[in-house]
Amino acid sequence: MITTKRPEDFARMRRAGAVVARIHEVVREAAKPGVTLLALDAMAADVLADARCTSNFLNYRGFPGTTCLSVDREIVHGIPSKRRLKEGDILSLDAGAIYDGWHADAAITFGIGEIQPEAARLIEVTEKAMWAGIEATRPGARLGDIGYAISQVAAPHGYGVVREYTGHGIGLQMHEDPQILNYGTPRKGMKLKAGMAICIEPMFNLGTHETKVLDDDWTVVTADGAISAHFEHTIAITPDGTEVLTLP
């Protein structure tokens, strides 16, 4: 169901979004070689508690972590564990917060220490694609405009654009309609209107777009073992344009 948000609803989402941005800041600063994913997840939980927010990931359909922490070939939904980061890893952090019933959700990918040039380029291009999708988001635009803008950034590099996992609406639930594909045809699909909130969420793979799910029934990895990058922001669509709600 697509819900129409009021300015006061966006204010609550903006507050949740600031907490998500703080999680990103704290975890990124602490993510060094030798640090465990569980330690990083605990830091995120502390940020949420200090802000009197709750995690929209923890216990979502049984998910056991406060955040999703995905390393190298893991695309999304990585479960925090005793795994220790090492020099050269790339880490995707997907985090969310709920404030007064309203959700915000955002993801970043970054390197641990010195990383390979192809990994750094993948991260740079995936983030660029997220911003291209955000720039295509405005009242009167269509969903296909967003997907097309994202996929066009990937195309010159030959990256696999993940298809099974997408952007989404957000509000009183973390995942609401509409589904927002990371590929599409311009001027096709549902028209965007003021009062909507959506998450723009590209995931690019260094190899094929194909994915598989590990035996934990959560962690999504690249089918060919190539590395992956993931970025996401929560966006408010207003009569005056758009606002990113998960910026610091």
Image (cartoon, rainbow, N blue to C red):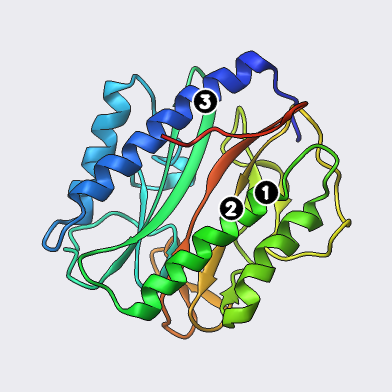
Q: In which quarter of the image is residue 123?
A: bottom left
Of pointers 1 and 3, the one earlier in the residue sequence: 3
From the top left corner, tell me how far across and down residue 34 is, in percent. 11, 62
State the mark number for residue 135. Answer: 1
Along the horizontal axis of the image, is 166 left or right of 36?
A: right
Q: Can residue 214 be seen in this view?
A: no
Residue farthest top in this picture: 8
**Taking 51 as reference, is 135 above or below it?**
below
> Number of callouts in the render?
3
- Residue at position x 53%, y 19% from top? 12
Q: Quadrant of the N terminus?
A: top right
- Residue at position x 38%, y 24% from top? 53
Do tag 1 and tag 3 residues touch (Cβ < 8 Å)? no
State the mark number for residue 131. Answer: 2
Per the model, the C-alpha gap separating discs 3 and 2 is 18 Å
Q: Residues within 10 Å of mark 1 (few under 14, many from 20)?
A: some
State the mark number for residue 83. Answer: none
Q: Looking at the picture, which amino acid does disc 1 mark?
A: Glu
